[in-house]
Image (cartoon, helix red, strand yellow):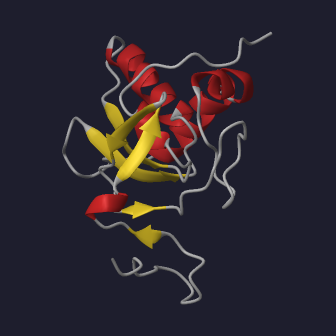
Amino acid sequence: PAPSPSVGDGAGSGASVAGEEDMMITCDGVARRSQCPLLPPVHNTKGHQISAHGGWFYTRQSIKSHHARFDDSFGVDLYKFLTAGAGKGSGSSTATTAMYDIGAGVGQWSSFVTEHERQQQTVGNNHRIDVASFDGGYNIECFRGQTVELQKSG
């Protein structure tokens, strides 16, 4: 088969557009079909935590060792800043702010927002932040929708 076309600077350094045969990634040692048509070139990353293109190669252990919970104090202030004035003048009792989290890691901000909003609903705060999270880690989609253990704080 012909090589996959490249997306990026035209010199072949961008992510490949995967063909049917290229749509496999390894999650916990099991080959799975990827849902994303843009995949970084596959390199032997066994034993390495960073892929050849600078993205994390995630394992449960590397997540636990290198990723911390989003800071509550900073999160509350950032949430207030992002929702200040949301919905004013709209006549709506619920205000939504949309945001993209680029370089989201394993979703600590999104997780913070979900938990914070759950707590705020009990006191009548109807603001929402609709977060769409993206990360360039080689196999990040293997952990989509899962709960993973983070570094212990303190």
Q: Residue furthest front?
A: 1
Q: Residue at x 46, y 22 (%)?
A: 116
Is residue 124 visible to us here? yes
Give the answer, above or below, for where 79 lies relative to 154: below
Please state the horizontal and vertical placement of residue 54, each as a whole percent of the image: 69, 57
Q: Residue at x 50, y 69 (%)?
A: 15
Give the answer, above or below, for where 100 lies relative to 95: below
If the image is split into quadrants, where does the C terminus sit? top right
| Along the viewing direction, whichever of 80 and 7 lies nearer the viewer | 7
Please state the horizontal and vertical placement of residue 96, each as a whole percent of the image: 31, 44
Res 58 → quadrant: top right
Please state the horizontal and vertical placement of residue 151, each as a whole percent of the image: 70, 18
Please state the horizontal and vertical placement of residue 52, each as a whole percent of the image: 69, 58
Relative placement, left or right, of 46 versus 132 is: right
| Along the viewing direction, whichever of 67 and 38 lies nearer the viewer | 38
Is residue 69 visible to us here? no
Res 48 → quadrant: top right
Q: Residue at x 51, y 19 (%)?
A: 148
Relative placement, left or right, of 4 versus 151 is: left
* Count of numbered tags: 0
